[in-house]
Image (cartoon, rainbow, N blue to C red):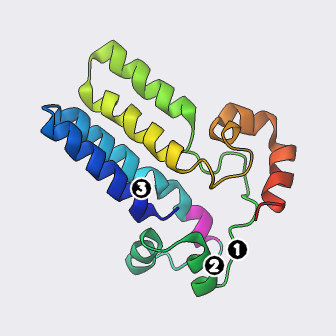
């Protein structure tokens, strides 16, 4: 999914929270839901996408297929089970636990933003929804590598 679609959905949901009187939670949702895809930069730059501001901006508004066509690369099998490191339920659980401990509405919003982003990505990765657990990815890396090879 395009990063711009994540940004639009997260900013819209964050604005709704803002209007409902929860501006701090809205900001957390908008920021975390929008920026979770920064973990793709290293993966794509290593495959030929220009590591410039223009390349980054272009990637935010292009689909995976368009990126492959424009820059002549395929997403392929990631080098590590940790890719994409921010796309995991463990970070969402950490955010909500920290929110419960601190009472931070920003962290409650961050939890919402992460979960919104992951829900939007359910069809974008092999072995979903299990894919979104970094612990599962680590334990099942050989099977996940095969799933990546056969993906699309």
**Which percent across, then down, holds residue 106?**
27, 32
Depth-wise, is mark 3 or mark 2 nearer the camera?
3
Based on the picture, tell me whether residue 143 belongs to the magenta stretch. no
Quarter of the C terminus within the rendering: bottom right
Crowd rating for badge 2 (residues with CA inside 10 Å; few <14, some 14–19, many 20+)? some
**Which label's residue is closer to the chain start, 3 or 1?**
3
- Mark 3 secondary-structure assignment: helix
The residue identified by callout 1 is 74
Which of pointers 3 and 1 indicates the residue nearer the eye? Answer: 3
Residue at the disc numbered 2: 68
* Cα gap from disc 3 to disc 2, whole angstroms: 20 Å
37 on left or right of 54 = right
**Does residue 119 appear to the left or right of 4 in the view shown?**
right
Disc 2 to disc 1, C-alpha distance: 5 Å
Q: Quadrant of residue 71?
A: bottom right
Residue 109 vs residue 44, the one in the foreground: 109
Region of the chain picked out in magenta, as a range: 42-46
Q: Secondary structure at mark 2?
A: helix
The residue under label 3 is 6
Looking at this view, name the residue that lies furthest to the top: 101
**Does 43 appear above or below 102?**
below
Q: Tell me the distance, in whole angstroms, between the alpha carbons under discs 3 and 1.
A: 21 Å
Mark sitting earlier along the chain (2/1):
2
Q: Quadrant of residue 151?
A: bottom right
Residue 76: which quarter of the image? bottom right
Residue at 31% x, 33% y is: 109
- Residue occupying the point 74% across, 45% down: 127
Q: Are marks 2 and 1 in contact (CB under 8 Å)?
A: yes
- At mark 1, the secondary structure is loop
């Amino acid at each position: 999914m395009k990063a711009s679609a994540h940004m639009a959905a997260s900013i819209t949901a964050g604005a709704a929270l803002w209007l409902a009187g929860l501006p701090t939670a809205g900001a957390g949702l908008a920021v975390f839901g929008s920026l979770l895809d920064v973990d793709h930069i290293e993966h794509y730059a290593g495959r030929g996408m220009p590591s410039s501001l223009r390349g980054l901006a272009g990637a935010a508004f292009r689909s995976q297929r368009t990126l492959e066509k424009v820059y002549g690369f395929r997403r392929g099998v990631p080098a590590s089970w940790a890719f994409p490191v921010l796309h995991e339920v463990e970070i969402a659980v950490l955010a909500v636990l920290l929110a419960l401990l601190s009472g931070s509405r920003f962290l409650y919003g961050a939890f919402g933003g992460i979960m919104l982003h992951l829900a939007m990505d359910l069809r974008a990765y092999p072995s979903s929804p299990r894919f979104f657990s970094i612990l599962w990815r680590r334990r099942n890396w050989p099977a996940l590598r095969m799933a990546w090879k056969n993906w699309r």
